[in-house]
Image (cartoon, rainbow, N blue to C red):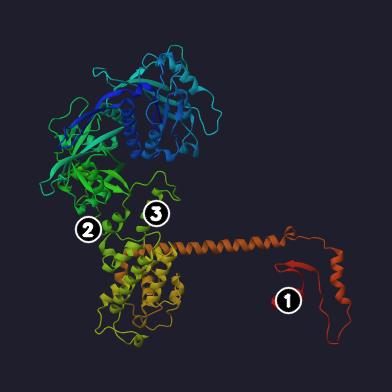
Amino acid sequence: MDFNEKTVFVLNHTQHFSQPSRDEILLESGTKTTTSTKAIFRKSLWTNTVDAVIQYCRVVFDLFSHEKPISIITFDSEEKIHSVWLEEDQNIETLWSVFTHEGPPKETTLDLKNCAVMPGLETACSMLQMLKPSQKVGQVAENTGRVVIISASMRSQITSWIPDILNSLNAPVNMAGNASVSASEWLFVDLVADPEANYEAPQPIEPPPGVTGSSTHRFFYHQLPSNGTDLYRGLMRLVESHYHLASTLVQDIPMKEEANTSSSSTMYGVELLHLAEVHDLLHRAGLADRLFVRSDTTEQETVSTLQRPNSGFSKTLGIKWVTPKSADAALLRYAISAHRVTLADVGNRASTCLAQFVLGGRSVALAHRLPVNFPSLPAPLNATSLAPSTNEALLLTCHGSVMYLHALATICPLAHPVHNPPLSSHTPPSGLRVQSFTDQVIRPSRLAPASAHQKFTVAPRERAQQHLERSTRYWPVVDSETLFGSNKLSLPLYEHLPKEYLEPSESAACTRAIDKLVNAIKDNVSLTDTRKGALKRSAAPLPVAPSVQAEAIALALEVDHLLSVYSNISCDHKEIQRYWKDAIGVSKPSSDSKESSLALTGADSFSALELHEMVTIARLIATGQSTSCVDNVPDSLVKTVRSLRTLCDSLNSATNSNTTTSRSSGNRSDKRLKTEASQFASEESLILEPVNLNTFLDLLQPMKQKQCGATKRPEFAGVATADAKGLCQLYRALREKEKE
């Protein structure tokens, strides 16, 4: 059962917590000429409690934001609820404001032995019943939570309080926005000053005999020392177990001392806190146990003081800092998970420097530097066919203003691409466009964590799938099946066309690439200058080989098809296609290949065609249609176009879908006309309504007027009716309005 959905802290704010603890603050006063005096101050139990609770909440806020809210309740002479489940209450600034206004403990004395119910417990039950904002949106399946009570001398009274707690939890809930608590965990923490007390893990408490309704609610008792450092580490152990966290110590970070920047660098260590899932792959590879610098019982003495972890977590995994390189960002393609991280000691100089370095946009790889023994691989995937594994196990980077740890699969050899991928016999491995696929598909499609709180019109996973679909609408896999893919001028189009929206600079980059492509194509399609319209354009100074001309026309067909498959994404994409059509001389682009072929009947031979007409002939060849409308179609063009199998398949599928759509739309039109005709033929389609007799007679009054001449006859005024312009008379009035 997960009790992390929400947490309530109940803090004792009575006179007992104003007592001084064993923590001393030594202050010196005086000058060189006068005798210095020393003053010793002791921190109160309340100060230590506030410091530890704030650190507990800081870790939760940094790792989970407002997903797992925390509420603060204090009691002295009265009970106070300082924060609820609202998002604006889940931050450190609010906590500082709460404890600042609360001030030091009151002089109120409270003997818990004489209390039938400890103050704050019923209020905590009410807070658990209150739904947090995310629970109010959907249906509440389970309403769970945890309550942490920090006080003193509670052990003997806890059992007597449990029945009242269960009665409050199981009572009917009639208030809107509340729901019954399905399960809860209650942890009673006693602060003691005895250094020899038992500070082991929390001990379970059994409810009194005969108490019902306790099967889903559990109770624990825990003792923690009252001094500041031990109390802080005790609550860090609790946050570790409550939220399933882990600690990673980044070792050997070179930093120079502030006082002497010219000196050599000193190696520091920075401890990071995160979910325990970050270490899953290291556990599976058998590396985690060898990387722990601290375990439950001992702490290795090999770790220097500057690199020793300070969080108090039960286990800390040590991993080495790798000097940052520009290629570290490419390791994101091997990431199998990403988790938010926070610093264990935010006031430490080394921690601050590391945070500023990463939040500045840098990525840092973290390596384990240990030999890895993997089980034997299958025969087809032996060691000779796989790239060796690397030591980079984690990647520390930032997304927005939040630091993340990416778990990398590079420690496993199977994470690297196979040198000899299994392919069919007719496709040579050397023909695969591996580098182009990496640059044009993988890198633009890298994933990053999306906010769980932001409302998206389209889910991030669906948007990622849509982007991948757009990136692969037309993408030949083999070099021999594309001419445009190996052309450097194609890079702007492959980079910007798959995007959902185009900025003005991106559209301009596409049009510039089209201009260069058209100029290069026109230089290679001219055999002679005797073609139709040759005087209007510059011909090549030397004859062009038929194979070069065929490749240029096939390249133009490929560009034309590429722009057509992306033209339906947005108006900007449509404008880019229209710009291409204008550049190759198409005044009215037509998607119907049959209509385009009819326009070529006036041409004598292929060499007399314009560029856009040559592209049309190439499309007919790719779709297997007849090219009898022109003479002397080069065999090299037929061979080149048919060698682009991906293009031919894509054009054929588009032609078949258009034909099917036109037939189905024609069938639907015929059916609709027949249906409408049958409706008009039926008597139910006629609506007869009586007309006002007085109105009808008034409209007939003009018929009584005398004729002005023998040749003139008054028009029949007809019956009154109504149209969009108001009341009018049939026949004459309608004809007059038509003239308007």
Query: Could you tell whether 588 is left or right of 352 in the image?
Result: right
The image's mark for residue 466 is 3
The answer to whether one can see residue 411 in this image is: yes
Q: Quadrant of the C terminus?
A: bottom right
Q: Secondary structure at mark 1?
A: helix
Q: Is residue 70 above or below residue 216?
A: below
Q: CA distance from mark 1 to mark 3?
A: 55 Å
Q: Secondary structure at mark 3?
A: helix
Query: Could you tell whether 70 is left or right of 383 in the image?
Result: right
Q: Quadrant of the N terminus?
A: top left
Q: Secondary structure at mark 2?
A: loop
Identify residue for label 1: 735
Residue 503 is situated, as x and y percent measured from the top left of the image, at: 38, 64
Which residue is pictured at 27% across the width and 39% down the height? 346
Circle nearer the N terminus (2, 3): 2
Query: Residue furthest toward the front?
Result: 33
Query: Could you tell whether 287 is left or right of 722 in the image?
Result: left
Residues at circles 1 and 2 in contact by the CB criterion of under 8 Å: no
The image's mark for residue 428 is 2
Circle nearer the N terminus (1, 3): 3
